[in-house]
Image (tube, rainbow, N blue to C red):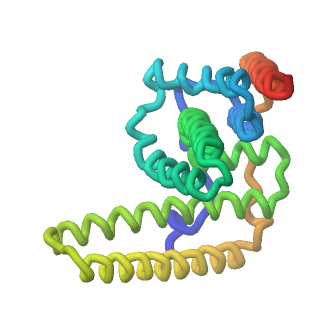
Amino acid sequence: MTKGIYTLEFPRQSLVINSTNSNSPAVVLVSALSYALAVSISTSIAALFTALLMPLTFILTKRFKLSHLVKINIVNIIMIFTLAMTWPIFIDGLVMGAVIALRVNMICVAFGVMIYPLGTAGMYEALCVLNVPMKLRVLVILTLRGIYTLSERYSSSITSVKLRAPELSGMMRLKVFAYMIGNILLQTSERSENIMRAVKCRGGFGGFKQSENDGFNLRDIVMMTGYAFYVLGIVLLNNA
């Protein structure tokens, strides 16, 4: 167990979230979550079209690659046909599935451009600025690190299987995949227990008091105001 693995202390240089974005992480987080909430409740064509403007801008300015949406849209296609087949009226189910898929894509693009670049350090700073309770802040960070660990171990396992058995197929392929998933979950569970023991050894959740609250500047106020009007416009169009 080393400090570099089981610590939530971030050096100051790692808190430079994005050199091209000088906005407060808290403002970015609140703006993205507000947009996602407005999109999730939108059903009218006018509201969805208005909400689509921001993701389209991100895509056209090449801040988000469409290739990142391939996997999620494979799941969306399955969801659309499942809804269509189980809905009382096939066409209505198809339309509802398409609307849900559109919402998922818009939120995915927004989060990919706004929240994902914040990283673990940016998320922690945003939660500190928003005065989120200490225990919840640490739990969120531990959850994020757990997700990253799962992703890294899954990628490593896939690479290992491809190198050792490139022609694997049939039932053996399913068995290897099941073993791989089980092994990843066991390793991640053990790592989580080690992290929790480290938290307790360092004095519990109170041992991670760290805040990088630099306050809000004019750019942050402008961004909050702009997103507030944008989100309000989506909500009003949806209820019009």
**Which part of the image, by quadrant, shows the C terminus?**
top right
Q: Residue at x 23, y 77 (%)?
A: 170
Left or right? Give the position of 89 relative to 184.
Answer: right
Residue 210 coordinates in the image, percent (x, y): 73, 52
Q: Residue at x 72, y 33 (%)?
A: 35
Residue 235 falls in image quadrant: top right
Left or right? Give the position of 108 relative to 131.
Answer: left
Residue 16 falls in image quadrant: top right
Q: Residue at x 30, y 66 (%)?
A: 158
Q: Nearer the viewer, residue 215 or 162?
A: 162
For the image, the number of numbered tags is: 0
Residue 222 coordinates in the image, percent (x, y): 76, 16
Q: Nearer the viewer, residue 54 or 73?
A: 73
Q: Is residue 17 visible?
A: no
Q: Is residue 108 above or below residue 217?
A: below
Q: Nearer the viewer, residue 74 or 211?
A: 74
